Each structure stands twice: as structure tokens, then as C-alpha cells.
Image (cartoon, rainbow, N blue to C red):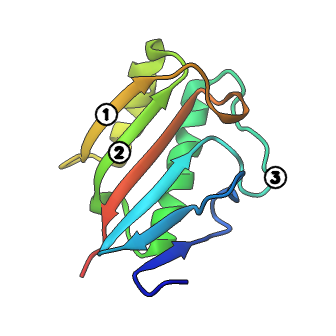
Amino acid sequence: MSPLRTPVATDGAPRAIGPYSQAIVAGGFVFCSGQIALDPATGEMVGSGDVRAQARRVMANLEAVLAAAGARFSDVVKTTIFLADLADFGAVNEIYGGCFPTEPPARSTVQVAGLPRGALVEIEAVAILPR
């Protein structure tokens, strides 16, 4: 482990399903890997075919990773939302917006050809660590 970059791991979010960390703390920032709707206890996909249920699980997973790094949603400065179908934008936006009721972060939203494990939504985030 480098003193300039610290991996973050928590049982409150699914374990990485590849060679990556749940997040990395570096330079006063938390760089969170994309979260999909895996239940951290079972490793199974939540809400098959239900983008709202998946978005809720994704945000809960992201919140757990941020907390393990010492941050919270109000510290997030940038997110990227990946959707399997851009028609789900409104539903995901509703769930997402509930986590950022004031001063939401900068954001990009893109439709992708596919997501891991057939997920409907994946969200990654960058947060600044509170001093």
C-alpha cells in the first residue's frame, strides 16, 4: 500500500468482481469504482428487470463505500451514471436525486451496450474528503 493511495474495502458493499478496489483514496479525494445492484451479503443481483430497485441498491452500495472512506454523498463532486437503456433515465434520476437533495455533484449519464452481470444501471463517484 502506497502512502499516496489507499485502497478502500467494506463489507457494506459487494466485493470487487475483478482486479480493482471498491475505491481508492488519493490526494484528498475518494475515487469510487462503479457500483451495480449486487447485494453485499449474497453477491446476487437485486431487482432483476426493475431499474428503480437496482438504482436503490446501487446508491446504498455507493454510500457504504463512501462511508468506509470517511465521506458521504454531500462530499461527492462528480458522478457518472451508466444505463443499459436511456429510457430508464427518469426512474434512475428520481432515486439518485433523493441522495443529493441540495447542491448535487457534476454528472454525466451515458447509455452503454452492456453492464456487468446484466445490470441495468451502474454508478461511479468521486468525492472530496472532508478536512
Q: Which of pointers 2 and 3 lies earlier in the amino acid sequence? A: 3
Q: Which residue is depicted at the point 37% across and 47% down?
A: 99
Distance from disc 2 to disc 3, alpha carbons, whole Å, reads 26 Å
Q: Nearer the viewer, mark 2 or mark 3?
A: 2
Instruction: Return the residue at label 2.
Output: 79
> At label 1, which amino acid type do we have?
Ser
**Element type at marker 1?**
strand
- Mark 3 nearby-residue class (10 Å; few <14, some 14–19, many ≥20): few
Q: Which of pointers 1 and 3 lies earlier in the amino acid sequence? A: 3
Q: Which residue is depicted at the point 35% across and 56% down?
A: 126
Decide if residue 69 is on the left or right side of residue 58. Answer: left
Quadrant the N terminus occupies: bottom right
Instruction: Return the residue at label 3.
Output: 42
Distance from disc 1 to disc 3, alpha carbons, whole Å, reads 30 Å
Quadrant in which residue 36 is drawn: top right
Residue 42 at x, y = what percent? 81, 52
Q: Which residue is depicted at the point 78% across and 50% down?
A: 43
Instruction: Return the residue at label 1.
Output: 108
Distance from disc 1 to disc 2, alpha carbons, whole Å, reads 7 Å
Q: Is residue 81 above or below residue 8?
A: above
Residue 65 at x, y = what percent? 52, 63
Q: Is residue 110 above or below residue 29?
A: above
Q: Is residue 51 above or below residue 38?
A: above
> At label 3, which amino acid type do we have?
Thr
